[in-house]
């Protein structure tokens, strides 16, 4: 019992390491929570930090979801433990203990945990996100479409009910975190990728 609890705590703390905030500080740039959309994520960093730094943030956020799941699989590969660890890493990104519980929206970290649990589902979600984002030039729209699709992809490609429930929870949280973006999409004021205004 102690090992699963320890794994969940480690996953939460690891997820609480904000790639955007840390990398911006190391690069001598402002806190991303004070710039642009105020979201500590790759899309916002792209607006003022450039593609290279945004790519590093994206990779960092994915890895902090992927690594705890892979580590937990090495220690205790039971489905219920892996699902719990994945959720804790995701929640760490949303509500990071190291940054006053004010985190990002969780898209890249959710992809990381899903890749660790079910790589075919993860690849399908990445393809969905990229396709919609590139076509529309709106990153949040790609994220929302992928979030809606995630439980259906998991239901089709995975035999584990725990993972279906997990992806449904993650999807609900992702949509909730994007509620301001949803309003902007309806109003036609959502920013396009690469736009500074």
Image (cartoon, helix red, strand yellow):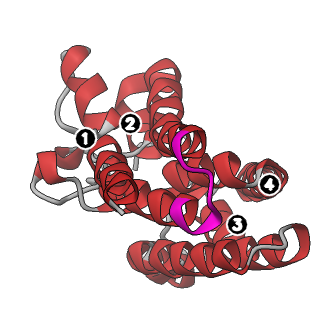
Q: Nearer the viewer, mark 4 or mark 1?
A: 1
SS at badge 4: helix
Which dot marks residue 128? none
Q: Which residue is mark 4?
A: 135
> How far apart in space, not on screen, are marks 3 and 4 (Cα)?
14 Å
> How far apart in space, not on screen, are marks 2 and 3 (Cα)?
21 Å
Q: Which residues are magenta?
A: 75-81
Rendered location of residue 135, percent (x, y): 80, 54
Which dot marks residue 45? 2
SS at badge 2: helix
| Residue at 44% from the left image edge and 32% from the top image edge | 57
Give the mark nearer the N terminus: 3 vs 4: 4
Give the mark nearer the N terminus: 2 vs 4: 2
Q: Quadrant of residue 154?
A: bottom right
Q: Which residue is mark 1?
A: 32
Marks 4 and 1 in Cβ contact (< 8 Å):
no
């Amino acid at each position: 019992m102690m090992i699963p609890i320890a794994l969940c705590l480690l996953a939460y703390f690891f997820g609480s390491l904000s790639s955007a905030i840390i990398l911006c500080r190391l690069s001598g740039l402002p806190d991303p929570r004070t710039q642009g959309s105020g979201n500590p994520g790759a899309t916002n960093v792209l607006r003022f930090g450039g593609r290279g730094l945004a790519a590093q943030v994206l990779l960092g956020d994915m890895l902090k979801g992927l690594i705890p799941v892979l580590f937990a699989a090495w220690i205790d590969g039971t489905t219920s433990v892996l699902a719990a660890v994945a959720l804790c890493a995701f929640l760490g990104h949303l509500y990071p203990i190291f940054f006053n519980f004010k985190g990002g929206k969780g898209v890249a970290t959710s992809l990381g945990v899903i890749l660790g649990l079910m790589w075919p589902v993860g690849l399908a979600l990445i393809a969905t996100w990229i396709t919609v984002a590139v076509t529309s030039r709106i990153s949040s729209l790609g994220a929302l479409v992928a979030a809606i699709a995630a439980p259906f992809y998991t239901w089709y490609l995975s035999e584990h009910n725990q993972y279906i429930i997990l992806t449904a929870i993650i999807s609900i949280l992702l949509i909730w975190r994007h509620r301001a973006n949803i309003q902007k999409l309806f109003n036609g004021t959502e920013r396009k990728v690469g736009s500074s205004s």
